[in-house]
Amino acid sequence: MIRGASRLLLCSTVSLSALLAIAPAKAQDGSTSLEEIDVIGTTPIGGDGLDRDKVPSAVTSVTQSDFSGVSQRSVSEAIARKTPSVSLADVQGNPYFKDFYFRGFVASPLNGTPQGIAVYQNGVRQNEAFGDTVNFDLIPEVAIDRADVFTNNPVFGLNALGGALNIKMKNGFTYQGLETEFLAGSFGKYSGNAQWGQQFGNWSAYLALEGERDGGWRDFSNSNVKRLYGDIGYKGDAAEIHFNVSLADTHLGVVGPTPQELLDRDGRKAVYTGPQTTDNKAAQFNLTGQFDLSNAWSLQTNAYYRRFKQSHVDGNDTDVRLCEDPVLAAAGNLCLEADDIIDPATGTNPDDDDPRLIVRDKNGNPVVAPAGFEDRPGSIERSWTKSQTVGGTAQATNTNELWGKTNHFVVGVSYDHGWTDFRGNSELGIIPDDLQVDGTGDIYHTTIPGGILPTDVKTRNDYLGIYASNTLDVTDRLSATIGARLNYAHISLKDFSPFVNYSDEAMTIPAGSGIDGKHNFTRFNPMAGVTYKITPETTAYASYSETNRAPTPLELACADPSNPCQLEGFLVSDPPLKQVVTRTGEIGLRGHTTPGFGGLLNWKVGGYFAYNNNDILTIPSFITGRGYFRNAGDTQRAGVELSADYQTDTWGMYANYSYIDATFRSNVTLGSPNSPSANGAGEINVRKGDHLPAIPEHQAKIGVAWRPVPKLTLGADVVIMSSQYLVGDESNQERKLKGYAVFNANASWQVTDQIRVFGLIDNVFNQRYATYGTFYDNDDIEFLNLSGSRSITPARPRGAYVGVGYKFTADAAPVLVTKN
């Protein structure tokens, strides 16, 4: 069904786009005249204002109407709802904590996920300093004015391998009024927000507050979200200056994947081990300015400070057991199982009686097994991250003619400095019937390399970028763009983990544990492209670009297979990693027309090819919950995108289809110890042409809105995703995670000019599906008697929500569907 629907949508959209591309662009009587977005900022800081039709790549814009009303979900869900080639993977079972995939590249809040998308908010980089993670839960949703999804443009700096997401916030010049909105519904969800904006002559002010609580439909998955955004602005004849503040405090219950067998037995609300929680706090202060220096020159600047704190708790089973040595076992001493360790000195498993395997407390004394631990051994991993970043950008734009031709030139420099303190430890625990590990208070470690060690690491990173871009109108139809960015990254790591010496050299945790180091990465990334207006309403484009990603401090500190890390908790070593370089080519058509039956149609069709050299992947180890990073050869993403958006006074419709072919381009052996296809060493052999996991090949999104009377709007949409390989099945030997089609419906009634009531139903037909799957070790928790290997994160069942909004000043009726 999924494949048939994808083919039907593909054929329909191609035919519609082809016919309308050559249709006469003549307005009909009664057609709707809609405002076009003529210019777009093509840099992180914006303000350069290039004609959208001269951008030689695909750009999708999501406006404030997509972040409000009946479409209000989370920031990532609002962007994904209509944007082609965007899918969400619910790794952790929390609506605020999803992986955001674009063209097979990911922006994820989860440490350990190799990042491939650069994200900016008002010119401030949102990829955190430590692991380049992106926490969408910290972005104030109600305050978003627009979000632009860019493809291949090196100007956006590090991490823009697959593209960039540039979010622009509201201010008192772009939003005036006062309104509030409240929503409540299924699974104990309720939310409220308020925003106010006002212009006072040359000055403006804007303030937004929002709070949400979600009880979670699965056990132990509740969330609390609090966010604030404020902006004070000044606009004169030749300058516009803004100071804005963004604050957020969130608590997220992240329940993670659960064995399929357990879901079938105990219901889809069941969770595996816990507790699993993430607490995030962020504060960002940003000063921006735009200055007209002359008729042709302008200057755009920003300077910022950002502070991020995260605490993570992860309850698990453990590979700690009573020691094999009968004397130690009789005393109740615990050891890490030798089968899960590779001694780097010998390349083999150590002896079971190796003293370095003994579990010890912070004073170096052997830990005695707590009561009940022998039957239900567990562990709680905790980590604390404190990051601060400062930086800024200075950019100049010139619109002087060049050789008598219209020309648009941008040059800029950016600098980001970040420093992070990271700590982590492990506590022994007992696993009760509800699988939520009870801590015993015993903080423990082992002394063998690759074992379980406490962590206290400080990192510093300096990112410098110099970029330039020039767009020249060669003719009145042909525009050519060339550009480049020079990226420099300096990363240093210093280990402050405790030095413990037990008067026996064999039982010493070396100071530094091998993490200390300094790393430098430099890359010059060029780009070039052309656009050509076939007709005044139809534009063709083609481009080529290169982008790079330097390894993060987290990846550099966790790159040794003999010393795997608890990915949310531990760092142990730093063999060098190579930076990832992506080369992208793109070609396409886009246009708009007023067809014979009225209304306005916008459409796009395009294809792309992105090739990664030295891609960095996360490799799981034999030790439960641990892994490491490595360069795993080359990978490739290639695809096709088609989209159309049609609107009249009473109807709004959109449809898009994406095909993504994400494959390995090198033969490589990877660790996947829990895969049924793994060999005795826990490895799988990946062949050139095997598909990357977690990326649906076929994606389709269709939506419609109808206004039968001026005050009533009815809407529905469907998201269709094809099957995908499970994470850990990079060799493509196991059964795929099934595809799905999810229908949603909404309605809105403008009761008065000030009052609006609305409702929405997610997953109307209560589809049972999942967006993420992997493998697990069914021997980990013996009393569950599990025999399977697949572990998935089930998606939410049907949910119904109602809300009310009140505007203290009336304005025009909302637009049905925004242009993308």
Image (cartoon, grey):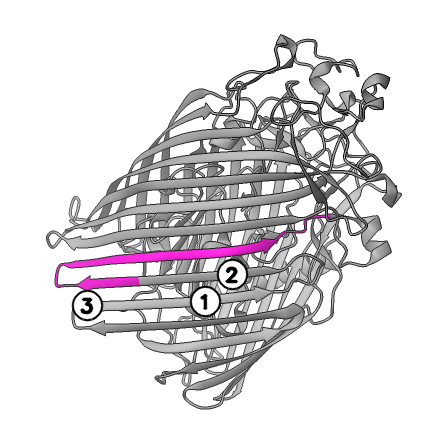
- The residue depicted at 56 percent of the width and 56 percent of the height is 96
Q: Is residue 703 visible?
A: yes
Marks 2/1 in contact by CB < 8 Å: the verdict is yes
Structural crowding at the residue carrying mark 1, measured as other residues with C-alpha within 10 Å and reported as few (<14), some (14–19) or many (≥20): many
Residue designated by label 1: 210
Q: Is residue 107 visible?
A: no
Q: Position of residue 545 (x, y in %)?
A: 41, 38
Q: Position of residue 651 (x, y in %)?
A: 52, 79
**Range of residues picked out in magenta:** 231-257
Element under label 3? strand
Residue designated by label 3: 203
Hey, what amino acid is under mark 2? Val
Element under label 2? strand
The answer to whether 806 is drawn above or below residue 235 in the figure is: below
Residue 251: within the magenta?
yes
Q: Position of residue 359 (x, y in %)?
A: 70, 25
